[in-house]
Structures are given as C-alpha cells and as structure tokens.
Amino acid sequence: MSNKEIIIGANTSQPLHARKPGYGTMRLTGDDFWGEPKDRDGAIALLRRAMELGVNFFDTADFYGPGVTNRLLAEALYPYPADLIIATKVGGTRGADKSWLPFAQPHEVRKSVENNLKELKLEQLPLVHFGKAPGSPGDYEEAFAEMLALQQEGKVLHIGLSNASTEQFSKAINMGKIASVENMYSYTQRVTDPDSAYGFQGGELLPLCEEHQVVFIPFFSLQTSLPADQQKMKTVADAKGITVAQLNIAWLLHRSSWMLPIPGTTSINHLQENIQAANISLTPDDITFLG
C-alpha cells in the first residue's frame, strides 16, 4: 500500500482497492445534517467531479438527511463504475425533531441495510459500518451476528465498525472478519476525549487495526484540526505553501499506511485541494516538529 491506495478487506477473498483520500458525503445535506442541500445541482456536480478526479471511495449513511446523501450518490453516479466503493453505516437513525437516535437492534440493523440497498440502487453493499452507542438497547454480539447473517445472504460484502471501542472491536473480530473501523481521529483528536460532544473512541484502535490489517477511516478530521491556535500546523503549512486542511490530510496519510481519510466539503475547490494532499510529502523533521 501507499499514500495513494489502500486495500479494504486485505485478509479476505474479495478485497477492494480504494484510492486516498476518499470523500465523506455528510456535509452535502442541509443544516444540522437534515434535509436537501441548499444547492442540489452543486452537490451533484461535486460528486461527479470527485469521481473525475479519481475518488472511488464515498462514505454515506441512510440517516444522513435522512436518505439525502444516498439519493444524491445514486443520482450523480449511477450506474456505478466497477471500481466504485460506497461505504455506508447502520446503528443510528434520526427523530422527527432532528435528534440522533440509536437504531442497532438486530431487526433495526436489517431494516437499515435494506433501506441503504434500495436508496443506493445496489444489490450488495460493498462496505457497511456497524455502530452501537454504549447503553443503547440490545446486545452488541446479537446485533453484530445479524450483520454476519446479512453478509452470508450476500447483501453485505465487507463489514466495518463505526464509533467503536476497543471492547467492541475485540468482540466483533472474534465473531467475524472486520474490514475497517470508522472513528473520530485527527492531528488534534487522537484518543477518546471525555469532554467531547461526540464521545467517540479515537486512536486507541489504530494499533489494533494495523495489527489485524484493518483499514482505519478517520472522520471529522478537518473539523477537529482547524482551530486557529494550531500554530505548529500553520508553521509547517506556510513553509510548504499548503493549507492547514491539506496538512492534516497529509499528516494522517503519513501516520499509518492503514489510514483512509474521507474529508468532506461542499466546495469543488476544497475538494481538489483535499485530493492533492495525497501528493504532499512530510519529512521526518516535519513529523517530529508536529509531534
């Protein structure tokens, strides 16, 4: 693998080859990740431009919008190229009041998978990330067993984990093959932050992913790495003539060969900058300075 390509499901008979970085669709929705985008034609154009620029990994979920990003992907890119990888997730839903609710019991997991298949116009989902918030109803192993059943039925090719703890990772990998983990992670957010509004696990899982040849997909990486007080990042970015956002993506790619960033944006210019970040080289001195 390299800074520009990664293998999903490397320890399986049907690996997928993703180019770095991928693209996260969450920001294509309306305000509060709810409803249609303000510029629907612009969102369609951005997705098509991403594919033209070589992006072949798109991250989505049926509860983005809800249903909005799935429908945008289908409208923009269907029929899909043979090498296109759409990763979706299950385990959550949205309330009518725009709240985020758990949806991770076995029958709910199955309903979400079926919904994603319909919205994305697919007969099989290439990659599905399963997440279950601590304290939400139902048993983790029972819900994950439903994911394995869906995989056996051919509705899911690869299974990943979302917002996973080390305990959940251990339980899941003892039950079946895990292709990826999607957790919050960035230059400034490397481990679980108890004060975070999100409360997700971070980099504790990265060593485990490397050990088991599991792709690590950081989300919110730009959102948590762009505070104005990141002087070290600004120093290196200015010296290289790049943006701090580009530096964060480059830092992630240098952090581990198993890293697949999925920066999201509604700007085609920023999209192009994010993709160009895969070409940025960081020296050992840069890495040491950034810490």
Image (spheres, rainbow, N blue to C red):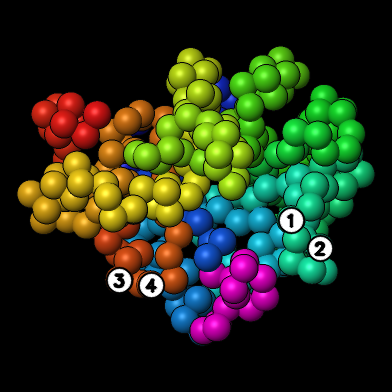
Q: Amino acid at mark 3?
A: Asn
The image position of residue 28, as x and y in percent, is 54, 70
Q: Amino acid at mark 1?
A: Trp
* Closer to viewer: mark 3 or mark 1: 1
The image position of residue 102, as x and y in percent, is 80, 47
Q: Are marks 2 and 1 in contact (CB under 8 Å)?
A: yes
Q: Which residues are magenta?
A: 28-40
Pick whichever of labels 3 and 1 is earlier in the sequence.
1
The label shown at residue 269 is: 3
The label shown at residue 62 is: none
Label 4 sits on residue: 267
Q: Amino acid at mark 4?
A: Ser
Looking at this view, name the residue that lies furthest to the left. Answer: 239
Tell me if I can see residue 277 in this picture. no
Element type at mark 3: helix
Give left or right: position of 282 versus 79.
Answer: left
Residue at x 50%, y 46% (from the top left corner):
219
Label 1 sits on residue: 100
Pick whichever of labels 2 and 1 is earlier in the sequence.
2
Q: Are marks 4 and 3 in contact (CB under 8 Å)?
A: yes
Residue at x 81%, y 63% (from the top left corner):
95
* Closer to viewer: mark 2 or mark 4: 2
How far separated are the C-alphas under marks 1 and 4?
26 Å
The label shown at residue 95 is: 2
How far separated are the C-alphas under marks 3 and 1?
31 Å
Per the picture, the main secondary structure of the magenta-coloured stretch is loop
